[in-house]
Image: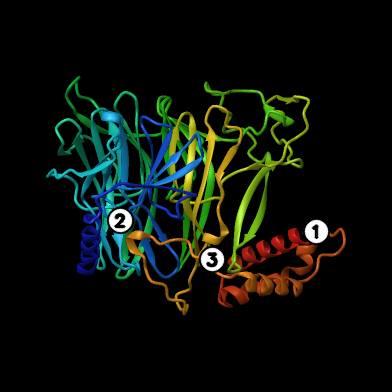
Amino acid sequence: MEDLETLIAEFRQLDAKKTQITEVACSHPLPRLNASLSPHPEKHELILFGGEYFNGQKTFLYNELYFYNIKKNSWTKLEIPNSPAPRSAHQAVVVPQDGGQLWVFGGEFASPNGEQFYHYKDLWVLYLASRTWEQIKATGGPSGRSGHRMVVCKRQILVFGGFHESTRDFVYYNDLYSFNLDTFTWSKLFPSGTGPCPRSGCQMACTTDGNVVIYGGYSKQRVKKDVEKGIVYSDMFLLKNEGREGTDKWAWVRINPTGLKPSPRSGFSLAVAPNNRAILFGGVYDEEEEEDLQGEFFNDIHIYDMVKNRWFAVKLKGHKGEKKKRRRGRKEEDGTEVKSEKQDLQTSMEIVKEIVTEDGTLMTVKQVINNPDAKADTESEEEEEEKEDGASETGPIIEPRARSSAMAVIKNGLFYIYGGMFEVGDRQFTLNDLYCIDLHKMNEWKVLVETDPKTQEWLDEDSEDEEECEGAAGGEDEEGEEEEDDDESSEEDDDHPPVQSEEPYSEYLSRTESYWIQLAKDNMGQNVKEKKALKMAQAMAKAFYDENV
């Protein structure tokens, strides 16, 4: 811990030497997760702060501040003196007061090897009009933590939950604090009723009438010495303000929503729309098998109506020119098409494409298109109507890659997703792509910044390639000579079983599957589980097949 405090102190000394604000245009930020992405309350901009990146050997923490101009689709990096120290898993909220303010609380700093953590309990405000940071030194606030959640509710900031981890132990919280934006004072709240159990990574959403909804979360339990078990929550609570006007009296109420609830998951992203709706995206569900952790990542969208206390699973509509076959029935007030409990969910098919990064690792990109072979098993239950606008069918609907720990925000009726991470085998891919979708149309995702495979760096633990840790600075993209690797990759492709003339993929896979499984085991280790090896084998075979037909 002393080493981390020394690193943070050194950063603050360097930062104290800065006297001027610098503003630099850039293509886009480096990949990261667990940053904060907030809507500018006065301008058509998004504000990105902090985050982390792990390259297989070292953890990089950032305190960088970026502004994304929505109209120009451009990024600007802003360096301001007296800024918060590098951190991730913090929380940030915005208020429109005095030209806009960005409030930041807590988060964590990690050692380069990711084995030590320092949890912040500081509170900062960025005055957007004057572009100045200020640390608010108010007593009585939450203890140091990360993974907590924070919302603005009228003229106060509410902080709930989170966790603190040291080399010896960990603790999860379910306490609740309020920071008054008028008096700049902290107070601990003690709501009546039974609230959520201790957790981190839940999601909070403030309703227009001043109540707060809490959904899901994650915690760990120590089963026995040196054995821990993760717990994923999918329960929901309402933090209800029962006080009269001008006073606060809080109460916890357990709520049981109806509709199509999201499947159990952690690391999902959530943003609140102005019409009392919360938009949930992605996440991951980890299946723990002995010491092996298998993660299923998601890229679906769910909407929670905070007035009706109901979940909806969103199905993208596609272009207007598509030939659509859809069930006659309920449609939401804002025009969003949702799935009902009785609706056939298998009306689309998924196409998986593989991008091969420069180090030879496969990265999966999913596309969802209408399934021409899907059969409506419930035609007798509901009528169907065929709608044609006279135009031919368009191409497949593009969606963001399934991921967890992405940053989500809503601005001007658009839902934005930035960054996050997913895993392939033992490797982690951290993203820096940016997508948005119109919440009124819900027809398709728009790609604003694509994932750059060159940023998918990964260093094995036993790699001889030792790089100097940039720490707070985060470093710049490195350029290397990759032509030799490309040539080697091409030579390797020549050794794979060739695709025969007009051979369907299903027949090709059936004929060559044993070869690809053995190749997967060669790359992943002979002790890899069969299910894992088969998944990788099929992905490799599909990628090779697509390149050669």
Looking at the picture, how far across and down is residue 426, in whole percent? 50, 67
Quadrant of residue 118 within the rendered picture: bottom left
Q: Which mark is residue 549?
A: 1
Do the CB atoms of the residues marked 3 and 2 lie less than 8 Å apart?
no
Q: Quadrant of the C terminus?
A: bottom right
Left or right: where 341 falls relative to 274: right
Tell which circle, 1 or 3, labels the residue nearer the N-terminal end.
3
User: What residue do we see at 73% from left, 36% from top?
Assistant: 394
- At label 1, the amino acid type is Val
Dot 2, crowdedness within 10 Å: few (<14), some or many (≥20)? many
- At label 3, the amino acid type is Gly
Q: For the residues carrying marks 3 and 2, which lies nearer the camera in this image?
A: 2
User: What residue do we see at 17% from left, 43% from top?
Assistant: 136
In space, the residues marked 1 and 3 are separated at their CA atoms by 27 Å
Residue placed under numbered mark 3 in the picture: 425
Residue placed under numbered mark 2 in the picture: 86
Dot 3, crowdedness within 10 Å: few (<14), some or many (≥20)? some
